Image (tube, rainbow, N blue to C red):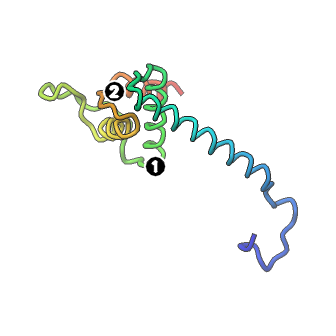
Amino acid sequence: MLALWPNEVVDEIMPDFEAAREHLQQLKTLGQNVAATIAQHRYAKLPFGKLLRFQIVGAICDALQEYVPQFRPSRGTYDAQTKRYCNPFPEAVRLIFAEITGINEQLDHLIQEWINTQKAR
């Protein structure tokens, strides 16, 4: 509000602070629940189901596409020596996934599936 001072602030441009507070609280609660679920899986060494893995990979890919646009979404080029696809995009996804879940995986299929869903849009 001070950014608009000293001009008068008309009610029509004032945000609904209470609604914003409620939405932020819901978002915080959701984030805490997701973090607790992931921590529980890691602590109990439970397998991350395919859907949970895909959702985590999808969220990572979405964030990379939005915040690091120089990482073009690509599975990369297959390297027979390392037996994996190489490219900055999948490497970043793998590193972030490992940091979140504690699991080092190739994720090639999940990354390709995310790329395919983006092309279909």
Q: Earlier in the sequence, mark 2 or mark 1?
A: 1
Q: Which residue ends up furthest to the bottom in the rendered image?
A: 6
Of circles 2 and 1, which is in front?
A: 2
Mark-to-mark CA distance, 2 and 1: 21 Å
Location of mark 1 (residue): 67
* Label 2 secondary element: loop
Between 2 and 88, the one lying in front of the other is: 2
Label 1 is placed on what type of residue? Answer: Tyr
Q: Which residue ends up furthest to the front in the rendered image?
A: 44
Q: Is residue 108 left or right of residue 49?
A: left
Is residue 48 shown above or below 99?
Answer: above
Label 2 is placed on what type of residue? Answer: Leu
Position of residue 81 measured from the top left corner of the image (x, y, whole percent): 12, 27
Residue 10: which disc? none
Q: Quadrant of residue 9?
A: bottom right
Location of mark 2 (residue): 107
Position of residue 22 measured from the top left corner of the image (x, y, whole percent): 74, 47
- At 46% from the left and 49% from the top, the residue drawn is 67
Position of residue 92 measured from the top left corner of the image (x, y, whole percent): 33, 41
